Image (cartoon, coloured by chain):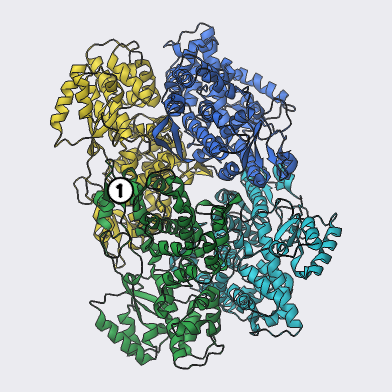
Chain colours: A green, B cyan, C yellow, D blue
């Protein structure tokens, strides 16, 4: 039997808290999971800095990747023998599902912004480059790696295949909503996936949903809405993210200015130069990042040292709501006041906007958007979800940007008393009983 | 109000997947959680290498510690106003619960064995030494740190207090069973803790259980039994543990033999010398360990390099059942055969016994044992659980030792064909369809 | 100690699948639960005919009543020692919570409509009339029964007390959403009640919600929305309700027309005459109703016999969507055609509208509405929920009426072929592959 | 396509709280569910009088029967294409699973004992008699009804088929343990059924379990053990059962002694005469029983009236532990004392033994026992579970009989003071603070 079609002697399972079991029957899948590139995902947290808000959120991209694979496996199980479904695409779907996040690095969001990286680019590189993953895929079939890369890149010609991995109701999202809800412990994020899978139908260029399942889909959309505001955009998580970005900025700045680190940060150098090779990239995981942050807590540079100490020991910035349209003058005044006190505002007075974040909950009409969700009506026609569902219509397209101003409350309170401190306190409302700041999951 | 009695303006909560919420009212508790020593527990996995078997088991000792604190908080809530309970011990109980695992390092089991460490010793050191934890405790009350240390050391005079943290049915075990079950996703580990807490009663020197709750306690004992065999002693986890121990042994051996590492392993030196200071100890976490294992994948020493590569990429040893009473001759023959092939048997042919592991499920009569579980009968007398419960009696004291022989199947299969390889295959049953090896959660 | 303040020697608990345990400490509550009037609620299903759609929905009003009591007990536990809360109202709240549904009869919706009854009137009667419940309440304090009745009637002067039992986010709704979700098994209906209780605050005339809990309340509102459309308004349930109403109508009609029943329906006579006494009312439960329906399956009257046989054996009507604004002519034609075939359209061709049903999910502005949900902002002001929450604003006030036309598909298919049958088939779309009808939980 | 092989146009589902969905593909199954004989199971509670202890236990035999069907459907799905499995038996298995409890009547345990009935006999009668169920089965294939009856009777020649419905680990038990746990809300009763189904293998004459699943089976056995003692044998449930039996005895006695009931109990007459026809039997459900108990609360006979009032209003008997070997003299004295007070001891002083109850948890060796559980070892041999599992060995065969003495505490306390009352109080320990009696789920 060709390697591509080889089945394991006995099905293997992984115990999974979210899907109960992840089932593997294909030799190719089993071998891909065993590669160093895939095992590396164990050392990268699925939710980056969220564990500092929700202590349960310590799960890795490894478990999420298995979960996406499992959902696609179940979808395909339901598609078998249905019109529009070509079972020859089965292994391709499974591989793309398993590998879709392969290029994620540690704390992707901050790293990508500061070092101008793109995890999707690296996913492509790993699949097509000189890696064990690549070897296995090509062993399955010459050219197979490119096909997998195309599916993940959304350019594969069979858009039905693409839609399983990336659309508004794809296996990726269905897994992460449930998984992130499970590990954070929040009561949102639950929906009836079993029902959604039961009413999903293959069409020529996408998977659609039988209209009898509309309410289950509404529930899924609402879960997303709640998860984004309650978990993904949580201001405490963003506080940690702000500090992390500033650490990376500072280290890069020091490197560019010939600062001598106590230990040469050789894992970072290619990133500082913005030219990491695939090998540089694969060597970077959260353990490595934490190692340097450990060391940097003892660096001479006070800013780097302080920020690292804050990040490692969760001494985060506090925040207030901030309206950039009305409060720029306040911001400018604060900037000057910070300078006067010797607290560098470029690192310690930070505006962060949720709209910077790469999440959306449902925007059917926008450009560059993933495929909208289509309902399959009883007469066989398709109808876009928000045209049928009052509740989805009501929330779709509502862009709620939320700006916050972050600052080190503890340091500010330690300033010498005087008019400068007093004015800072006023502008940041630190003279009033504390308003609005939330901690942990409160 | 004295610091010791200070309450937070508003109660704070942590969202916890196991207990729903962890509630904090005391300023002292809040401040302890914020210390670097406590935050460090986020970088140490609760279940060490188990995540290589159960991919969900990525949770840290940080969340377990919060959980133990929360359970003790609830127990005390039920004890208030009951006879035998002195509410003056409340904060002491909470602190001891929160801090009881403070001295754990990364992969404690292997590290302790190889480097002759004792995490309980370090817990004491952190509480009594020059740390932020110590400062806060002493600020609460001079001498308070010592009291907390004594409770954890089980030498505190009020044994009722001790029993909440360490007995056969303490908050520690009740948390870890449920937490480890939740994160691994296994269906064992559940029991009706709410009922157990409801029937727990303070007595002079221990907490006892009203006999009407006996069945809930039986269920708890059975959960322990199942968790030990299904999770804690899982042979795949032990395979990873075997490799980890061998890495540490090898690195120590190389260090002692003046091997030159590409990067001086300065975080490890004090451990190699078996004289780590408190500072050395606190600096070691899993990130640091992984960092060196990363580096060592490129070391010149073939054994260290290979073992690290195996650990990082989960290329584990396989195993067979092994009976030391009957198979020592086979072992000796294998040892010689391995030597002939150039595979160092000291690192690659390893017998591991579950009885080495520090777990027990219920042994009421043994020396040095934690307090047995006592039932409070309707006439006010106490009765040891296994004398009342058939089912606990049936399993208590049953010591089931389980020996396995671990080896690198992949390398052995790659040996040149010939009589040596053939004999090895025979002795390890690799010539037959594979028997008995389990992977992941199967 | 006066009876009113008497505590049970040991707290009693009921094991409850939804709230884990229901706790009873007060002698008065314990005694009320033991009355025949309260025990009678065991023989009345919480969801009436829904069990014919969701087979798990066999739970009674007894368990719901305990659940509402338990939620109020927990709310009060959180209110203790807070401003605006008078602990003297505690027992009153608990009694009102426990007894609020006492006047419900079997299949209330249909019975009330056909026999012009009002369960709220009977709740009042039971509390104030010559019953064991009344005796116990008066024993607690003369005039106490009237107070309890006033709270349930919403006329009690302390509106904070009233709001716990009846407002847009009261204990009644919080219990039934969760309980009905649990027993039907649907994945909707879940929300984080523990969090809502934690952020609920007493104000002078109502309980309000700290704005930090807004998202939990949004989730609760969404649960209501989903439960109404997925469970409470389910068209199959309404089909059973239609048949039930027609049975009652027919029996009343026959009685009024001097029809001789094989067994005098003496439990029903007072209802047929629309003058049931409290005693008549209390004697009617579902067992009695089923008993007569059993008998009536053997009555001479064909309509009564057939409808009862349909109800008992779940041979329900099918339905199509129906638009009264556009399809009245079709309806009139069908009415005539039914008459021609000898199928009495008054019993077998029925339009049912969801807007007839007594549910709403959130209508802050309407007349006669329960109190809207108010958020307690950080500056101490109140703000109505839909003004703060985009998502609640989006769905509130949206009245979605849904009309369906019910008919006996089986009988129609058995008609002799011919133009009459053919036209009926056309008008009811029975000639096309079946559209739109759902069965069970599909 | 022959009726037997007919598939529904679209699969139908029932939402089930325990198994999420029950799936129906076969026309025959769909039609069987719609029969009056099967729908009748909705009016018979799965757990008889347990709802008086666990208020959630209001679920019917209807939902259990669907559950057993669903489990068998899943088992067969796993068996397909495996050796030893003949897919020609598929529909037979499904029908037998669905119908196996068809002959249960209301409160079977008491009714069977008092009226000398046997529900298994009636299951056979319904399947083979003049019923809609019979018609459908014969339409599927002449002689099919008899085959189904044989499977349920355990006499069908293919014992593998029989073992799915009745063995020590059959679909019946797997459903009821989980279902009863779910509805009562107890934390016992859970086990990893998905895993058990995954390791179940067909053999010639039974289904066996791969030894790798032994721990899941241990957990299942322990769940049974806990459910029996915590739920099925709960002394409060047995108290209700005692009263119920006494009602039936009294009514029969009165009938036999020409007592004139206010309403002729015509549904009961055939039972009093111990000669119910199939039609008599099918007409009896819980609604009918409750109807008569309602009426009998107003009968002239004081015993019948009182017992019915107790049962309907849950005014149960209290109990004490009773040892028949040592306490017969006490019993005899109490019997005489009761007579003196005018309380008829034949109805009001009742010894009840758990060993009378038809449950066992695991008795591999006994006569007339269901097939024991066999493990399929890695070498292909079979091994009986208790020989492999320490823990099952420890509990199997342990017969724990538990006797209790039931009596009306309330009436006894109302007796006139004097030596008789005093002696009764002493013998029943009513003079001491109450010992041992549990209420509800405590």
- Which residue is drawn at the image coordinates 28% and 45% (left, top)? C156
- Which residue is drawn at the image coordinates 55% and 53% (left, top)? A26
- Residue B401: image quadrant is bottom right
Which residue occupies the foreground of this view, B417 or A295? Answer: B417
Q: In this figure, what is the number of numbered marks?
A: 1
Q: Which residue position is annotated with label 1?
A: A375
Residue A73 rendering spot, x and y as whole percentages: 48, 51
Q: Is residue D137 shown above or below D175?
A: above
- Residue B154 located left or right of residue B192: right
Which residue occupies the foreground of this view, C138 or A415? Answer: A415
- Residue A156 located left or right of residue B353: left
Which residue occupies the foreground of this view, C177 or D336? Answer: C177
- Which residue is drawn at the image coordinates 18% and 25% (left, top)? C334
Q: Quadrant of the C terminus of chain D?
A: top right
- Residue C67: image quadrant is top left
Residue B204 in view in this figure = no
Residue C87 rendering spot, x and y as whole percentages: 39, 52
Q: Is residue B433 shown above or below B147?
A: above
- Toward the top, the furthest residue is D258
- Toward the right, the furthest residue is B329
- Residue C127: image quadrant is top left
Residue A46 rendering spot, x and y as whole percentages: 47, 65
Which chain letter matches label 1? Answer: A
């Amino acid at each position: 039997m060709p390697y591509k079609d080889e089945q394991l002697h006995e099905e293997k399972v992984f115990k999974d808290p979210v899907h109960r079991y992840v089932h593997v029957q294909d030799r190719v899948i089993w071998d891909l999971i065993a590669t160093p590139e895939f095992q590396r995902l164990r050392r990268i947290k699925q939710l980056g800095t969220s564990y500092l808000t929700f202590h349960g959120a310590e799960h890795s991209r490894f478990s999420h990747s298995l979960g996406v694979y499992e959902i696609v496996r179940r979808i395909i199980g339901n598609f078998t023998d249905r019109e529009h479904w070509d079972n020859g695409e089965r292994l391709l779907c499974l591989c793309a599902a398993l590998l879709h996040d392969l290029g994620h690095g540690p704390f992707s969001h901050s790293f990508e912004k500061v070092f101008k990286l793109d995890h999707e680019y690296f996913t492509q590189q790993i699949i097509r480059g000189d890696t064990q993953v690549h070897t296995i895929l090509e062993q399955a079939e010459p050219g197979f790696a490119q096909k997998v890369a195309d599916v993940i890149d959304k350019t594969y010609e069979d858009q039905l295949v693409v839609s399983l991995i990336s659309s508004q109701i794809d296996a990726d999202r269905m897994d992460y909503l449930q998984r992130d809800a499970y590990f954070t412990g929040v009561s949102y994020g639950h929906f009836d996936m079993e029902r959604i899978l039961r009413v999903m139908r293959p069409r020529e260029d996408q998977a659609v949903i039988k209209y009898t399942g509309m309410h289950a889909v509404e529930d899924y959309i609402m879960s997303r809405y709640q998860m984004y505001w309650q978990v993904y955009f949580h201001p405490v998580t963003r506080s940690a993210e702000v500090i992390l970005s500033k650490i990376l900025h500072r280290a890069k700045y020091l490197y560019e200015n010939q600062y001598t680190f106590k230990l040469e940060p050789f894992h970072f150098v290619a990133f500082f130069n913005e030219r990491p090779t695939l090998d540089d990239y694969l060597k970077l995981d959260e353990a490595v990042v934490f190692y340097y942050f450990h060391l940097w807590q003892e660096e001479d540079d006070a800013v780097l040292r302080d920020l690292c100490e804050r990040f490692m020991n969760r001494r985060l910035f506090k925040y207030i709501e901030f309206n950039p349209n009305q409060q720029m003058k306040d911001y400018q005044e604060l900037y000057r006041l910070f300078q006067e006190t010797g607290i560098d505002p470029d690192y310690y007075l930070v505006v962060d906007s949720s709209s910077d974040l790469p999440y959306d909950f449902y925007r059917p009409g926008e450009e560059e958007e993933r495929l909208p969700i289509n309902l399959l009506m009883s007469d066989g026609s398709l109808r876009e979800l928000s045209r049928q569902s009052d509740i989805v219509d009501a929330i779709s397209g509502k862009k709620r940007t939320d700006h916050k101003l972050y600052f080190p409350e503890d340091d500010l309170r330690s300033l010498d008393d005087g008019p400068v401190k007093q004015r800072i306190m006023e502008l940041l409302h630190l003279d009033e009983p504390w308003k609005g700041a939330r901690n942990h999951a409160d």
